[in-house]
Image: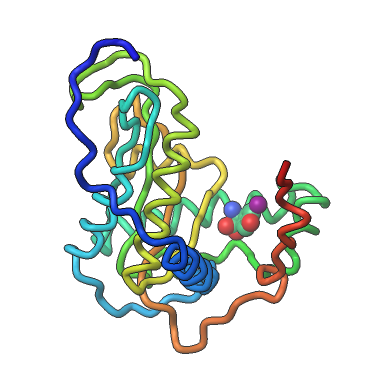
Amino acid sequence: MQQHDSSPLSDYIEYPVDEMLSRSQAFYLDIKRRHTIRSFSDREVPKEIIENCIKAAATAPSGANHQPWHFVAVHSSEIKKQIREQAEFHERGFYEGRAGEEWLGALKALGTDADKPYLEHAPWLIAIFSQKKGGVNSEDSNTNYYVHESVGIATGFLINALHTSGLVTLTHTPKPMSFLSKVCNRPENDRAYMLLIAGYPSEDATVPHHAQVKKSLEDIATFL
Ligand code: IYR
């Protein structure tokens, strides 16, 4: 390996194999309980929980460790209202034809439509932005690498952290999503990647049957 500054790996924990087995099983059973939820309670969630989850997301690996992401956690009712208005405006166009028949057919079993009341009801909306330019320091403007992959991994970490904290989430990708940059007051370099809705489920929250069907291990994995 080329000469570079480093320090010994000091926080790795090795578990006995039987413990690894039970940990992997426990993790699977826990993450399996994560469902995309579309009906949120307006119960408050302390900001510190969201901060911890964002810090967890930001430990994700990224191209050249440039960390090409920015998270805007929206709690303000006024800003949530603006996001709802704009998202519903775009979604109406989508559901009224722009999506096309095949796409609308694929969504039927999820029961989604252009109404997004949760954008105002849920305590937190987390807008995730990707950055084409940046670097290890926030003020850098170098090329970032594998931006989509990096932000996707960080988003996965964030969803996992929110679930592990005891919250439910919805991954929302209004199309187009560019209005989020303006509403969240982000610079030109930041491109909206996804909007995560986080909070408690409403009492009558449901999970579509369609979303509960997961492919078998044989279908999704090959061991050579
Ligand atoms: N963004 C729209 C449509 C939508 C698209 C896909 I692909 C989904 O898996 C779910 C919804 C909406 O949020 O309604």
Q: Position of residue 29 (x, y in %)?
A: 52, 73
On the question of residue 173 being in view, the answer is yes
The quadrant of the picture showing ligand 1 is bottom right
Task: State the residue at coordinates (49%, 42%).
Answer: 177
**Closest to the observer: 163 or 176?**
163
Q: How many marks?
A: 0
From the viewer's perspective, tell me whether residue 166 is left or right of residue 152. Answer: left
Residue that extends furthest to the bottom in the rendered view of this protein: 203
Q: Is residue 92 visible?
A: no
Q: Is residue 223 above or below residue 206?
A: above
Q: Position of residue 132 (x, y in %)?
A: 39, 22
Q: On the picture, is 12 further left or further right than 109?
A: left
Q: Quadrant of the image for the C terminus?
A: top right
Rendering coords of residue 93 (x, y %): 64, 49
- Identify which residue is drawn at 36% across, 28% down: 131
Coordinates of residue 33 in the picture (x, y in percent): 51, 74
As drawn, 149 above or below 52: above
48 left or right of 56? Answer: left
User: Could you tell me which residue is drawn at 46 percent across and 67 percent down?
Assistant: 18
For this rendering, which residue is in front, 12 or 86? 12
